[in-house]
Image (cartoon, helix red, strand yellow):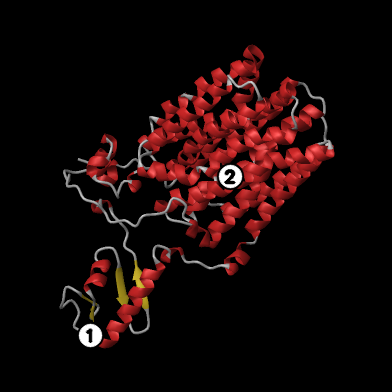
Amino acid sequence: MPTTAEAIPVDSGYAWVILFASSSLYMLLSGVTKAFGILYTELLIAYDVGAGNTAWIGSLQSFLYFAMGPIANHLAVKFSFRMTVMLGGVVMSIGYLVSAFVPRVEWMFLTIGIISGFGGGLLYSPCTTLVSFYFTKRRALANGIVLSGSGLGSFTFPYFYRFVIDEFGFHGSMFIVSAVLLHICVAGALLRQPYQLTKGKRLSDHTPEVKANLIGNDKTKEKRINKKKIPIVDLSLLRIPRLAMYVMSLTINIFAFSANFSVFPAHMQSIGLEKHKITIALSMIGATEIFARSFFGWLADLKIFEKKKIMICSAVASGTAAIVIPFLRNFPAMIAYGCVVGIFPGAFWSLMAVAMLDCVKLDRLTSAMGILTMFLSLGLVIGQPVMGWLEDATGSWNLSFRVMGACYYISGAILLMEPLIEKLWHYDPETKENPKQNEEQIKMLISRKSETRLPEDTSENCHNGIILSENVSNSLKPDLKIDISDSQIEKKAPMTTLSDV
């Protein structure tokens, strides 16, 4: 019978099913979101409302996708990724279904913005986090493939939206979109809970497939592992300099990137392009994302270039294109800009999860991704409305594109400033579990060392010749080992093995 380690699918077997399911989820979620530009132009015409205020619908929806990240990942760990994702699919479908009966645009802030956004928030962060637990050697490539599902959705959904709106009208199309979103539940049913997140549960609490992974051999004895509870929103992670750097850079980047999906189609409409040409240019974003995100993930796995350098080059290319595009007012230029938006910002998103793993260990990835998505929501919620207000004030989208370009440059500049950020706050993630308790234990041990010494291993509560109190002794076995010499105190945290589960 295979051992527990052999029963865990990493880089092979069911890991590819997880990859397929996560990519399908991301395709449905991103396709609906990024095709909002088609709905946006229809709303501007049908309801004759301001560009800035109407943009709040899509912005609010995207905000909740990311702001729900800490809660969604917490629910995924506490219950399961499968249950959380399937619940999100049902709620998201209900939001679009109710929109079919809405007579005024203001109600869509509730139906599409809040209800659908809440449902999407329950599945966005889990489906982008889960795949990292099932891949190690090809982790960046796997994340790139998942995020390339966004490209497939962005490429197909504009045509799909255009077709259903032309055939059934705006309200009729909401029925069909609602039905399509129920396929999220189908993809969600394929997900399995990774074994790294099951170590704090009893064996009887697990689903059958998790039991099979955990049993491995005939050891069926149930036990609990005492594990420190991690808060839903673990802001202490922001004390890690590199993680804080990525959070700042990605938040500013998404402020500009998200605005493309309302600014770009509205700009093309303002220069007189036909609707079908607008749809083609917008779909180029998705078409190039399909290949670009997988490519950047593959490139990162080769380790030829540092991930940070890839992201800096992406920011420079994206910013330059955004600043130049207002001067080019023809259809081929719009096609080219759509390709640039699909290719270069993709480097940021395909490397997002692996960048977080450069900052924290795998068992803290859900917390780190939750923090990241929470801050990304701040960039999302103001990106589209701010660009819309700039258009309302100036009468064109030119200034909006220039602001977007400046934000891309700033996001790249932050990555260049990593040495400065390291100097501003230094934090050792190895001591983040409970630094106060560690300090108290060390002081107690030093005090004991000066008072009493015994030969090594002569007492159950003796460690390196130091008599320990019962509480300290228990805290050191088996989870913590402290070696004390006259000149140094060294803390070692042993790795939890599968035999401990």
Give the residue drawn at x 66%, y 36%. Answer: 56
Q: Amino acid at mark 2?
A: Ser
Q: Quadrant of the N terminus?
A: top left
Q: Seen from this angle, which residue lies furthest bottom?
A: 451
Residue sitting nearer the eye, 241 or 294: 241
Most extreme residue toward the top, as rendered?
A: 167
Q: Position of residue 401 (x, y in %)?
A: 76, 41
x%, y% of residue 491? 35, 71
Label 1 to label 2: alpha-carbon separation: 56 Å
Horizontal side of 94 relative to 79 (left or right) equals right
The reply to whether discs 1 and 2 touch (Cβ–Cβ < 8 Å) is no
Element under disc 1: loop
Label 1 sits on residue: 453
Residue 64 left/right relative to 39: left
N-terminal of the two: label 1 or label 2? 2
State whether residue 81 is above or below residue 233: above
| Amino acid identity at mark 1 | Arg
Is residue 132 shown to the viewer in this render?
no
Q: Residue at x 25, y 50 (%)?
A: 501
Image location of residue 32, percent across then percent down? 58, 28
Crowd tier of the residue under label 2, counting other residues whose Cα lies within 10 Å: few below 14, some 14–19, many 20 or above: many
Question: Where is 130 relative to 189, above or below?
Answer: below
Residue highlighted by disc 2: 377
Q: Is residue 439 visible?
A: yes
Up-down relation of residue 244 to residue 201 (above or below): below
Instruction: Tell me where residue 113 appears, x and y as whole percent.
Output: 59, 33
Residue at x 50% of width, y 25% of height: 94
Residue 422 in which image quadrant: bottom right
